[in-house]
Amino acid sequence: MVRPLPNLMVAPTGARRSKADHPALPITDTEIIETARLCQDAGADGIHLHIRDTQGRHLLDAAHYRALLDRLNDEVPQMYLQVTSEAAGRYTATEQRAVMRDLRPAHVSVALREMVRDPDDWPAARDFYHWAYDSGVEIQHILYSPDDVRAFIAACEKGLIPDQTHLMIFVLGRYATGTRDGAALENYLEPFAKRDDMAFDWMTCAFGSAETESLLQAVHLGGKMRVGFENSLWHKDGSLAKDNTERVRAIVESLKSLDPTGQNNSAE
């Protein structure tokens, strides 16, 4: 049985930002573990993990991941621990799949558009998706656009991606422009409206100062939330957050402004 996604996942590091972007960005394993502990205390029940090499660059490495996961299981045993398979311009799909096959994580995020850059990639991608399913590796599918959603559903219909229950994250916006030029969240959800044959557990992340409102909208529409410095360094009012813990607290406080229907009653 697929484990439900956490209600509030923190993504504290990402693959691209550095301490030049924010001095409180956690880079080392010790910093990530401390961030996980503080964010759990603030209300996060899951963490999305990126690791870095000794030069601070994005890293995919099974041994390093395994050591970090062991420490986190000791420090925050109740948290949902998810690793990333992100390429970030450093890794090929073949390398991404190889690391995940070695690691065999319980939970991993995988971008469909990184696994399948052209139709010839589908045989290897299909083998990976089926391997993950058979091995109990739960994939949260990263979908960057409504077109990605439609491609994902088509792949499921063809049996390229197995199972009837799926975990997803809808990415709203991008680093350069925030959510200004992105599609509306409803457009990501529309292709699922008539899919009674499939079950979906989903969350949203969003770039820039619109992160808070985007996450509250996700809750209103029945989804879950991912917050943190991977996507945004800013509060709703545009002010710079002190650290990831402050962003988690801000989201928890903002949730209190929602009425029972999920509407935001805040006067801000």
Image: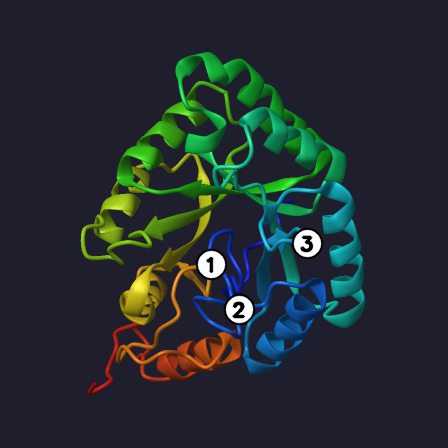
- Residue 184 falls left or right of residue 235: left
Residue at 35% x, 73% y: name it.
234
Mark 1 or 3, nearer chain start: 1
Question: What is the C-alpha distance between the residues marked 2 and 1?
Answer: 8 Å
The correct choice, above or below, for 126 with respect to 49 in the image is above
Q: Is residue 217 visible?
A: no
Closer to the camera in the image, 111 or 197: 111
- Residue 235 falls left or right of residue 78: left
Q: Point out residue 34 in the picture as x, y percentages from the top left corner.
A: 67, 74
Q: Point out residue 24 in the picture as x, y percentages from the top left corner.
A: 53, 74
Task: Tell how many labels.
Answer: 3
Q: Point out residue 205 in the picture as x, y percentages from the top left corner.
A: 39, 58
Quarter of the image where the N terminus is located: top right
Of tags 3 and 2, the one toward the viewer is 3
- Residue 25 falls left or right of residue 195: right
Quarter of the image where the C terminus is located: bottom left
Closer to the camera in the image, 66 or 218: 66
Near mark 2 (Cα within 10 A), the count class, few <14, some 14-19 or many ≥20, is many
Say which quarter of the image contains residue 254.
Answer: bottom left
Q: Are marks 2 and 1 in contact (CB under 8 Å)?
A: yes
Residue at 50% x, 21% y: name it.
160
Of tags 1 and 3, the one toward the viewer is 3
Near mark 3 (Cα within 10 A), the count class, few <14, some 14-19 or many ≥20, is few
Residue under label 2, please give it: 25
Amino acid of disc 3 = Thr
Q: Are marks 1 and 3 in contact (CB under 8 Å)?
A: no
- The circle drawn on residue 54 is 3
Q: Is residue 225 visible?
A: yes
Near mark 1 (Cα within 10 A), the count class, few <14, some 14-19 or many ≥20, is some
Residue under label 1, please give it: 17
Q: Point out residue 164 in the picture as x, y percentages from the top left corner.
A: 51, 34
